[in-house]
Amino acid sequence: MRTIEDASTERLMLFGYWSTVLVLFVAAFIVFNNALQIDTVDIVIFIVLALLLIFMTILLNRVRKLFRNRSDVEKVSHEERLSFLKIGALQDAIFNSANFLSIATDVDGVIQIFNVGAERMLGYKAEDMVGKATSAGISDTSELVARAATLSQEFGTSIKPGFEALVFKASRGIEDVYELTYIRSDGSRLPAIVSVTALRDAQGNVIGYLLIGTDNTARKQVEAEQALLDQRLRDQQFYTRSLFESNIDAIMTTDLRGIISDVNQQMEALTGCTRDELIGAPFKNYFTDPVMADASIERVLREGKVTDCELTANARNGKETVVSLNATTFHDRDRKLQGVFAAARDVTDRKQFEYLLQESNIALGNAKTAAEKANSAKTDFLSSMSHELRTPLNAVLGFAQLMASETPPPSHKQQLSIDQILQAGWYLLRLINEILDLAMIESGKVTVSKESMSLAEILLDCQAMIEPQARQYGIKIAFPKFDEPFYVHADRTRVKQVLINLLSNAIKYNREGGTATVECTMVGKDRVRVSIKDTGSGLSPEQLQQLYQPFNRLGQESRSEEGTGIGLVVTKQLIELMGGVIGVESTVGIGSEFWFDLAAAGSPALLSDGIDAADVDIPTYSSVDESTKRTLLYVEDNPANLTLVEQLIARRGDLKMLSAIDGHLGIKMARTYLPDIILMDINLPGISGYGALEVLRRDPATAHIPIMALSANAIPSEVQKGLDAGFYRYLTKPIKVLEFMDALDTALHFATENSLTSKARNPGISPR
């Protein structure tokens, strides 16, 4: 409208201007036409009219220019108003947008404006925040503290960790955009990107601050995921490189042409070249036999792998190293062949070790041979010692048993002497057996036959065997009453040996009138514990440390009780051979409790009673006619042993005895008289018992005769050796009369049942 009015006014002024110009021209024309001559007044009038015309023209131009400037100004003002309206609308849209968090505060940080976006994102109501809360109050305190510390260090001034930290840069006119975590009304956290602007009045004074923020959750999540992926990639690269570098082998990769593409530090050390020098160089260049090295790469590419390919690496300084090459191909994710991955292991030490091992094996073989000889010598010594000790002991115990069973019986005084002889003899026999047991265990020649067995039955056997000794010492022994059976996986004979030893110790080293208690309990689900507790004098800690030392009786040497100091050593080793554990708890003045644990077992499918027969008197035999008596040939070089066996045979009415003092004579008499039974010593002059056995077994005339060994060599391996050689039975000295008589009965029964031969008897030959 204003523009239209200005245009009309301008046209009116133009009209007035030209009207005035026309009037002036008309007036000038009239003046000049009426004047007869031109005088000074006319000239002045003309000049005034001209000046007036010029002035009117200048005035017209100025007015037109003013109108045009005014129009331009009004046009610009209109555009500015339109722009301001657009900006205002845009600001309103932004401020009221739900996607932007807009918070305006006063200079103290108190919230003055809290837009819709702030309400939506933070969960607070505008009426609860405006004029009541500060922007710092809904921000993460720890971030404010950290930001204050950072700004304080950056600007060299102390900044408080609150609203001041949020607007410090903006208050100084510095553009400030940063990350900030807001605390929502429900306590959750909102990561945001915040832009802070200072609000100023016309004089430039700060009157408040505007904080505009956007939700940074998605960006944070993306950044976190990307950071995690980046970290995983770095970790994977580091892990792969670490595997590559930490390997003790020299590792390299090559392309399909055999050109090295990567190496580890071990490869650098092997060749004396740097990684940069090696990469791009042919693989074959670093080996003394390039053709063989190149062929190994071709073989890998052809076959897919190669193992233990021996090459010699050649270092830059001339050092040669024998390596074992193991290589395989590698592919990309599309299974396209990329090259060869190879590992070269330095086997120089192994080669040297193999050489040393070869020499050591030779030395070890020599040492083994020497050890076997020494062990054989030890075995021979034990066998010899056993034989030499048992031979005289056989006579002592044998004749003592005969004297004890004479008719009429010996007098009381004689019986006491005989008892002393028997007691000392059997003690000496136990000592010999324990020494042999210890030696056999230490040499590893003792084997155990483990089976499921009932502890109740074993303890019943032990009770019958040990109660006489307990009564002799006046000791009461309490054995457990089993409500349910206990079974262990162990060797029946060895368990009985262990129990008898521990029970004997509990009796011998108890106080007068003391007690011993045997208990069986479960230890866990798979172990059975047997404990024997006595009321003796107990053992000190020093004595417990020496408990399992051979021949150490722990200061009991001065006491009257018999002992060797070997029993517990043998007991411990037997328990350990059966996979068990033995222990002791003792208190001086109170007593000791020995215990051992063995593996629990289930009930066996078939149990034998295993009860040993009690000692009984020597059986008597009905006399038969001399012509119907069976014949026993005894081959023995020791007169005392011959006499003992002769007297034992004399107790039987169904046998007569022939004797020979060496193996050759024994063979001759066996062929001549064809006895029903042959009893043979092992260590005989001329030919051993084994040699005589072999001769008689090869002779058809004597091959049917049962031959029993009777030897003082009681080592289990020797017993087994004798049985394997073909002896019908292997009896040991000293003779146990009942065992001896039972063996004779069994052999005679065997000969009778098989009707192996027609016996030739010669009544004219008297037994020796």
Image (cartoon, rainbow, N blue to C red):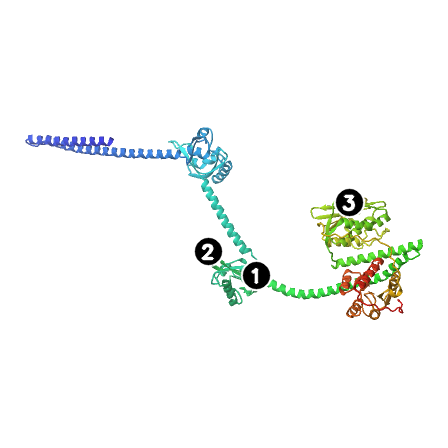
**544 left or right, relative to 36:** right
- The residue at which mark 1 appears reads as 345
Residue pictured at 20% horizontal, 31% vertical: 8
What number is the disc on residue 334?
2
Give 575 or 468, whichever is nearer the viewer. 468
**451 left or right, relative to 330:** right
Q: Residues within 10 Å of mark 3 (few under 14, many from 20)?
A: few
**502 left or right, relative to 36:** right
Residue pictured at 89% horizontal, 54% vertical: 419
Q: Residues within 10 Å of mark 1 (few under 14, many from 20)?
A: many
Indicate whether 671 appears above or below 60.
below
x then y, percent, for residue 713 = 80, 62
> Is any atom of residue 547 visible in this view?
no
- For label 3, the SS is loop
Looking at the image, do the residues carrying marks 2 and 1 touch, with CB atoms under 8 Å apart? no
Q: Quadrant of residue 667?
A: bottom right
Q: Disc 1 residue type?
A: Arg
Give 89 or 417, whichever is nearer the viewer. 417
Q: Earlier in the sequence, mark 3 or mark 2?
A: 2
Looking at the image, do the residues carrying marks 3 and 2 touch, with CB atoms under 8 Å apart? no
- The residue at which mark 3 appears reads as 481
